[in-house]
Amino acid sequence: MLTQPLIVIPVLVGLIVLLLIKGGVENMFRIVGNLTIKLIIGVLLLFFINIFGAQFDIHIPINAPTAIISGVLGVPGIIGLFIINQFVL
């Protein structure tokens, strides 16, 4: 229900306007930059875990939600993803 473009686009535009009003353009670019760096770190962590974990049949798919979780939460997020992948799915 939330993935419909008619809902998502105005919400994103509203968040961007709020960031511009609250902290200015510099603050918005800092937040977006930090999130981008964390996303890249999350993808790299998942990539290396999949490379080294192949010996032990460990595989965590690399997609947007798993990259965000591993990037923002770090090692506890990766452990959580591993537990979910092994025991829930």
Image (spheres, grey):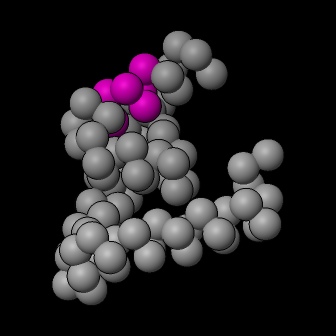
Decide if residue 3 is in sight here.
Answer: yes
- The residue positioned 52% from the left and 69% from the top of the image is 14
Decide if residue 40 is in sight here.
Answer: no
Question: Mainly helix, strand or loop, the magenta region?
Answer: helix
Q: Where in the figure is residue 58, as x and y percent of width and height?
A: 44, 33
Q: Judge whether residue 11 is colored magenta.
A: no
On screen, 86 above or below 7?
above
Q: Where in the figure is residue 71, as x and y percent of width and height?
A: 30, 52
On screen, 48 above or below 76?
below
Which region of the structure is painted magenta? 78-83
- The residue positioned 27% from the left and 60% from the top of the image is 38
Q: Nearer the viewer, residue 77 or 25?
A: 25
- The reply, left or right, for residue 42 in relation to residue 15 is left
Q: Quadrant of residue 7?
A: bottom right
Q: Quadrant of the C terminus?
A: top right
Q: Quadrant of residue 82?
A: top left
Q: Nearer the viewer, residue 8 or 50?
A: 8
- The reply, left or right, for residue 41 in relation to residue 46 is left
- The reply, left or right, for residue 21 in relation to residue 16 is left
Q: Judge whether residue 80 is colored magenta.
A: yes
Residue with the most extreme top position: 87
